[in-house]
Image: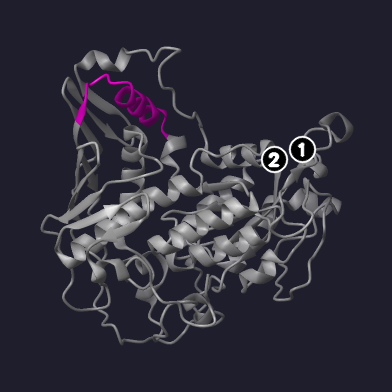
């Protein structure tokens, strides 16, 4: 196991790409496979992983499964131990040290042959981004870190795979989009259902091509899998050995350590996340946006529909999501907490379609056999979200969920949270990304960051 908190680069490999400087246009420099053989070192995408717990673990393993990738570094403020010798990986949660072990085990044969020097570990993401040998990064820390990590990565000229929700606030999301565009980096948002479920693309194509007529209403459901905690906001616990709590907090307010603020349950604290509205909601509403053709815009109006929020305790995100939104076209969107497996029901003048993450039903039933013609709308096809990102790094093409698209799906959820919190109708201009006529609501589009952190 190699553990480093040094800013010096380690083990520079032959490069897939040459970048003249941070923030410059990335130019492909691919050596033909006939020279070195398939997946030669010169053609490998060298990757670093920032945030290796939960989905960060899944993403890291997904990238490791590709022979043309070599993960050389991981970064996480948590070692992976609870301080009592127990690893957190029993439920799929890793941390820095067990992630390093997994990477080294995966490349065991290369280590023996001397072609892989071992995976390095970092506490500070800036040290990983400072490595010139790294082409791309996977970003999956808690949501309040996404914008800072993604913007820094873009400025360093790294291609970026960033977990959803894209950011903690609307203002952060727009800043991420601008940074990605300025640096001309390939960007993939982790709303992976666009790639993982071919039937969802089929549903979206049927809707986009008018198979159920003019869309009047969409009903979307968010799973009711909130967690509970007996902790209060000021409660504290001993910081686990090797856990850099200050780095974990980063731009968030200084508070005592409590385990309920970390791992999966961080998402139920507004300082770090938007609750299940932005966690599960982004997945479902990203598909709604895709089907409606509103990938780069959003609704113009939001209102609460009896959402429920905690009145005390540590967790302060919605326990029951319930809001209504309206698009400029007149389409009504209703989103609410439910145990229903349906993620979206599209209701049109000539029928309806209900989609789950595994299948869909429709009326008329024959729609399932409807063929999308060559002159009709056909949507971006991807069968694997990680593979799509890697292929786009090589081709410099746009991914299936670039920063702008990820930002729009996320901002839909963020503005909905504002309407639910304030219990009043919000008028939203998706072009300027401003709330109209409500100063209190408008201030909630951004959050202050604790110095020295800033975008």
Residue 391 location in percent, x, y? 63, 37
User: Going from the N terminus, do you reach mark 1 or mark 2 first?
Assistant: 1
Q: CA distance from mark 1 to mark 2?
A: 6 Å
Q: Residue at x 60, y 61 (%)?
A: 99
Left or right side of 345 for 383: right
Colouring scheme applied when the structure was drawn: one colour
Residue at (82%, 53%) from the top-left corner? 13
- Residue 74 relative to residue 276: left or right: right
**Which element carries disc 1, helix, strand or loop?**
loop
Residue drawn at point x = 43 percent, y = 53 percent: 164
How many numbered discs? Answer: 2
| 158 to the left or right of 242 | right
Query: Picture coordinates of residue 435 (x, y %)?
Result: 28, 60
| Residue, disc 2 | 67
* Callout 1 touching callout 2 (CB < 8 Å): yes
Neighbour tally class for label 2: few under 14, some 14-19, many 20 plus, Cα within 10 Å: few
Magenta part of the protein: which range?
197-215
In the rendered view, tell whether residue 153 sits above or below residue 108. below
- Asked if the magenta segment contains residue 306, the reply would be no
Query: Looking at this rendering, what residue extends furthest in the right direction?
Result: 35
Q: Give the numbered dot on residue 432.
A: none
Q: Which mark is residue 39?
A: 1
SS class, disc 2: loop
Above or below for 345 versus 258: above
């Amino acid at each position: 196991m190699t553990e480093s908190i040094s800013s010096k680069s380690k083990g520079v490999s032959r490069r897939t790409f040459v970048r003249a400087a941070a923030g410059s246009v990335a130019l492909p420099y691919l050596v033909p496979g006939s020279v070195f053989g398939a997946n030669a070192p010169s053609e490998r995408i060298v990757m670093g992983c920032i945030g290796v717990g939960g989905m960060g673990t899944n993403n890291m393993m997904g990238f490791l499964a590709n022979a043309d990738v070599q993960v050389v570094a991981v970064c996480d403020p948590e070692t992976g131990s609870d301080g009592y010798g127990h690893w957190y990986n029993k439920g799929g949660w890793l941390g820095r040290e067990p992630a390093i072990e997994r990477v080294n085990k995966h490349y065991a044969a290369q280590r023996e042959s001397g072609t892989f020097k071992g995976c390095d570990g970092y506490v500070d993401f800036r040290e990983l981004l400072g490595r010139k040998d790294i082409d791309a990064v996977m970003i999956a820390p808690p949501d309040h870190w996404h914008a800072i990590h993604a913007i820094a990565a873009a400025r360093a000229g790294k291609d970026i795979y960033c977990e959803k929700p894209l950011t903690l606030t609307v203002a952060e999301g727009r800043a991420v989009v601008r940074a990605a565009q300025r640096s001309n980096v390939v960007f993939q948002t982790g709303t992976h259902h666009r790639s993982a479920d071919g039937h969802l693309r089929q549903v979206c194509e049927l809707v986009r091509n008018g198979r159920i007529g003019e869309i009047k209403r969409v009903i979307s459901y968010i799973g009711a899998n909130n967690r509970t905690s007996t902790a209060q906001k000021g409660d504290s616990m001993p910081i686990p050995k090797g856990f850099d709590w200050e780095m974990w907090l980063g731009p968030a307010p200084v508070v005592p350590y409590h385990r309920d603020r970390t791992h999966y349950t961080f998402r139920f604290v507004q300082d770090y996340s938007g609750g299940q509205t932005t966690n599960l909601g982004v997945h479902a509403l990203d598909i709604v946006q895709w089907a409606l053709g509103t990938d780069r815009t959003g609704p113009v109006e939001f209102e609460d529909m009896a959402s429920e929020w905690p009145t005390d305790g540590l967790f302060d995100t919605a326990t029951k999501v319930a809001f209504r939104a309206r698009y400029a076209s007149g389409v009504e969107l209703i989103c609410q907490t439910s145990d229903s497996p349906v993620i979206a029901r599209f209701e049109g003048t000539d029928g309806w379609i209900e989609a789950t993450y595994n299948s869909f039903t429709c009326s008329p039933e024959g729609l399932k056999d409807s063929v999308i013609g060559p002159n009709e709308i056909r949507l971006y096809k991807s069968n694997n979200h990680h593979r799509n990102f890697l292929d786009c790094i090589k081709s410099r093409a746009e991914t299936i969920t670039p920063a702008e698209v990820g930002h729009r799906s996320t901002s839909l959820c963020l503005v909905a949270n504002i309407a639910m919190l304030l219990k009043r109708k919000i008028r939203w201009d998706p072009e300027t990304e401003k709330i109209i006529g409500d100063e209190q609501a408008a201030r909630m589009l951004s959050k202050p960051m604790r110095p020295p952190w800033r975008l």
